[in-house]
Image (tube, rainbow, N blue to C red):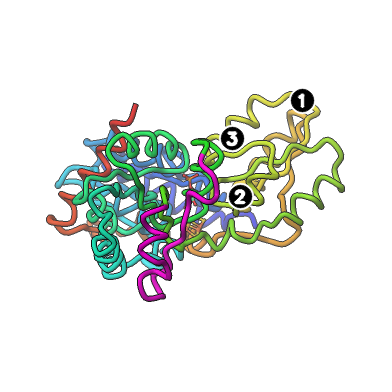
């Protein structure tokens, strides 16, 4: 729906009043009404770097979800304040791995006698606590755009990887990009004793995948791919690596949101694309590339927004910007010092990946 002109004007005025004091970051899954006010847009990797590259901005307004704002707080200076316009913008995947569950998992690996061989690799889509655990145990963070490089690095440090919390990104990267087999991967279920695995299974595995997933990307199925190929002859299927393995295996191209955009930019006029990622982004791309004669459709027949990304709407953004412009710091996301120091270690290992 088109943005309310009154709110658009208020957002513009508040932003103008704040000037260089504010820097607005927008993830690709944000609504159009919000993304129009972003100083930069990007995937989670690009936004982490962009946040760290703006030390002069007093306020970083993060239009995205909670774990992204935490990462921005970790990577920015102590004087900079990170604001999330709606505190309820969480991520169901990040919530699937708690600090207690991961500590328990480490005990299980220790009892199986393999903890010393295991390097944790945690997806950006995790809480600061999980990132701190990762840093403490010699591991790194990855995003969907550098997961292979992170795994290459991890397997130079140890023989096994504990991949948190997205089993699909872990499995897809291991099998698709690293030449491992499905049998090299086991799934650790935090709701079962010992993760539902025997010590033998843990010792035989190369990749120990946490049983987490994205509820948005989890909705694409092999049927969605087969249906679209039937509906649109010659279509290219391009999906995000948070999709299930069978979907990724049936797709033509796989990559992060930033990769999806670059692939479409480079595509020839007349080409047809079915995209398996969040709907705000796909709709925006469909509009943008229609002008260049490229047909872009959503991979599934059902609607598929990320409900927590969508919580950041224009009214929340206006409220945050106007509050800041009046000198009221609202919705600050602040990671405690101890957590921050270990989480930063893991994030910096990611930023230093070749
Ligand atoms: P990227 O931004 O890394 O493509 O990840 C997608 C996502 O699910 C963010 O929540
Ligand atoms: Fe989390 Fe999935 Fe939404 Fe990304 S798209 S914020 S992983 S629920």
Measure the C-alpha gap from mark 1 to mark 2: 22 Å
Element on which disc 2 rests: loop
Q: Position of residue 43 (x, y in %)?
A: 46, 42
Residue that numbered label 3 is attached to: 261
Q: Nearer the viewer, residue 279 or 332?
A: 279
Q: Secondary structure at mark 1?
A: loop
What is the x, y in percent for residue 297? 74, 45
Q: State the residue in front, 269 or 180.
A: 180
The residue lying at 41 percent from left, 48 percent from top is: 206
- Residue 294: name its quadrant: top right
Determine which of the numbered discs, if any, sits on residue 277 in the image. Answer: 2
Q: Which residue is mark 1?
A: 269
Task: Read off the magenta span.
Answer: 180-204
Name the residue rendered at 76%, 58% in the picture. 301
| Quadrant placement of the C terminus | top left
Identify the residue shown where x is 17% and y is 43%.
Answer: 77
- C-alpha gap between disc 1 and disc 3: 15 Å
* Depth check, front residue: 78 or 238: 238
Please, what secondary structure does the residue beneath circle 3 have?
Answer: helix
24 relative to 3, above or below:
above
- Marks 1,2: beta carbons within 8 A: no
């Amino acid at each position: 729906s088109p943005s309310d002109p009154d709110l658009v004007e208020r957002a513009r005025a508040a932003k103008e009043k704040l000037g260089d004091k504010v820097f607005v970051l927008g993830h690709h899954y944000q609504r159009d009404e919000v993304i129009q006010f972003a100083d930069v847009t990007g995937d989670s990797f690009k936004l982490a770097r962009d946040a760290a590259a703006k030390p002069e901005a007093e306020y970083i307004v993060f239009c995205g979800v909670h774990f992204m704002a935490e990462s921005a707080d970790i990577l920015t200076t102590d004087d900079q304040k990170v604001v999330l316009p709606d505190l309820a913008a969480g991520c169901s995947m990040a919530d699937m791995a708690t600090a207690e569950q991961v500590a328990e998992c480490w005990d299980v690996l220790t009892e199986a006698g393999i903890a010393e061989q295991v390097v944790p690799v945690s997806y950006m889509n995790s809480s600061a606590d999980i990132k701190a655990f990762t840093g403490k145990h010699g591991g790194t963070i990855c995003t969907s755009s550098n997961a292979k490089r992170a795994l290459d690095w991890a397997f130079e440090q140890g023989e096994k990887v504990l991949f948190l919390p997205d089993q699909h990104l872990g499995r897809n990267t291991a099998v698709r990009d690293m030449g491992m087999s499905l049998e090299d991967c086991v799934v650790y279920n935090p709701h079962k004793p010992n993760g539902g695995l025997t010590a033998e299974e843990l010792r035989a595995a190369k990749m120990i995948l946490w049983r987490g997933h994205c509820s948005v990307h989890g909705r694409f199925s092999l049927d969605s791919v087969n249906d679209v190929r039937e509906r649109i002859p010659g279509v290219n299927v391009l999906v995000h690596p948070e999709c299930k393995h069978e979907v990724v295996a049936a797709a033509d191209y796989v990559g992060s949101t930033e990769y999806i955009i670059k692939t479409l930019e480079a595509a020839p006029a007349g080409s047809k694309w079915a995209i398996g990622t969040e709907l705000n982004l796909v709709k925006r791309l469909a509009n943008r590339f229609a002008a260049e004669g490229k047909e872009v459709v959503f991979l599934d027949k059902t609607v598929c927004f990320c409900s927590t990304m969508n919580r950041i709407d224009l009214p929340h953004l206006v409220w945050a910007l106007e509050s800041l412009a009046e000198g009221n710091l609202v919705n600050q996301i602040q990671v405690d010092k101890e957590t921050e120091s270990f989480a930063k270690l893991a994030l910096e290992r990611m930023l230093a990946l070749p």
